[in-house]
Amino acid sequence: MLGAPGPSPAEEPPGGGAASALSGLTTRGRSFLAAGFAAAVCSYVLGQADLLRVGLLLAVLPLVCVAVLRRTRYRVAGSRRLAPARVPAASETRVHLRVDNVSRMPTGLLMLQDRVPYVLGPRPRFVLDRVEPGGRREVSYRVRSDLRGRYPLGPLQLRLTDPFGMCELTRAFSSHDTLTVVPRVEPLPPVRLSGEATGYGEGRQRSPAHAGDDDVIPRGYRHGDDLRRIHWRSTARYGELMVRREEQPQKALCTVLLDTRRSAYRGAGPDSAFEWAVSAAASVSAHMLERGFQVRLLTDTGSSVPGPDGGGGLSGGGFDGAASLDTAGLLLDTLAVVDHSAEPGLSRAYDVLRGGQEGLLVGVFGELDAEQTGVVARMRHRSGAAVAFVLDPAAWSREGPADAGESEGGLRLLRENGWTVVPVAAGASLPELWRAAGDHRAAAGAPRGGAAAGHDHERA
């Protein structure tokens, strides 16, 4: 009998019984059975009693092996462990399999096989020798995928054989494990973008933290409050001791907008424009979390992660390291399975941004026609700063660049509406583009500062 840790016992294949047992005969078992019947027929024709005994021995031996193997009550437990269970695309992970014999009798020869999707490679197979009572065997194999996604591993299958190799029976565990292949995350250089957190420009996108903060108005005195926090004016007004609130910590907000429209991209595969866009969204999200931002991932469908307001009770690493890891894991798991959408435009994402709070907006867009360029231009009005990475799907799919005049006109419209626009060529490096975005913001801010200083000098 086969079993697995927890409520996942081994299952027999459908159609159990004598028919399934005989179907497990090996080539050797079938040969012995056929030779036994042939010898019995020959003994009847020739009248040789000794030949009949030989035929019965040959025919009965595989049947006895089948009966003994089916009645053997093996108790075998199997387990699987992934190291790690979440891996970036084009990276390897190791799968550890463990088989424990928890019965009081040794097992025979065991053949172990694990089911894996074809994307991860061929099915691994192992042959295990006799496992003593209370013993265990451990084997491992490696899997690798260039495509992100969630891939089921299992169930684990064991094939039992008798000592003579006459019969094989297959049993399967019911438990599964899931390997999550997330997009590749590239480290980005620190740059000064307008609208970043304290020390990095404007702070219009910062909002008060709600969890664990003092009340907005002076509140009643509580046992243990510092007497230096007593607000005497409010105490005189309300007739009881009132304490003033401390300065509320600020959270920097950042929205990463990922364009997933099917009509905005061409081609498929790990080197396609859409996969670059997904990897860019993952890299920017992870980078902003490391810098203490509260990050929200938004797609053209209007769905946002981790929550409708981008908060979901989780903040960036500058405030809570554990929450930052949770947010990063949630964003990567979401991007691991994100796919093309059937949305015709970006209006749903615009509606979400129009009703939300101001903050830093980083958009990764595919092909933008004149109408969608206008929608993206209006998104800038609700953000403190906006950076757009615009891909040319035609160049990525090697079909030649799109209409240069129309494309440049759309980019110019975005710049006129306050976007920092970074065109993305085929195979471009995201860290270099991120640094270029910071340089563009600095170059755009310098003339305005110089002009303002000149006007002040004239007024003086």
Image (cartoon, grey):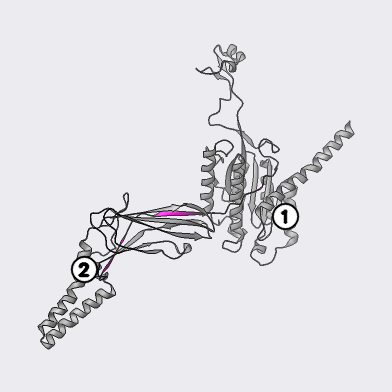
Tell me the amino acid under the disc marked 1: Gly
Tell me the SS state at disc 1.
helix
Is 204 above or below relative to 395? above
Magenta span dominant secondary structure: loop
Q: Residues within 10 Å of mark 2 (few under 14, many from 20)?
A: many
Residue 263 rendering spot, x and y as whole percentages: 60, 60
**Snapshot quadrant of residue 117:** bottom left
Residue range (magenta): 164-192
Tell me the SS state at disc 2.
helix
- Callout count: 2
Q: Which residue is mark 2?
A: 65
Tell me the amino acid under the disc marked 2: Cys
Location of the N terminus by quadrant is bottom left
Residue 202 rendering spot, x and y as whole percentages: 70, 37
Whether residue 171 is in magenta: the answer is: yes
Q: Which residue is mark 1?
A: 410
Residue 167 rendering spot, x and y as whole percentages: 26, 69
Q: Is 343 left, or right, of 448 in this rendering?
A: left
**Snapshot quadrant of residue 245:** top right
Q: Are marks 2 and 1 in contact (CB under 8 Å)?
A: no
Is 407 above or below relative to 163? above
Q: Residue at x 55, y 20 (%)?
A: 219
Q: Is residue 259 visible?
A: no
Q: Is 119 left, or right, of 448 in this rendering?
A: left
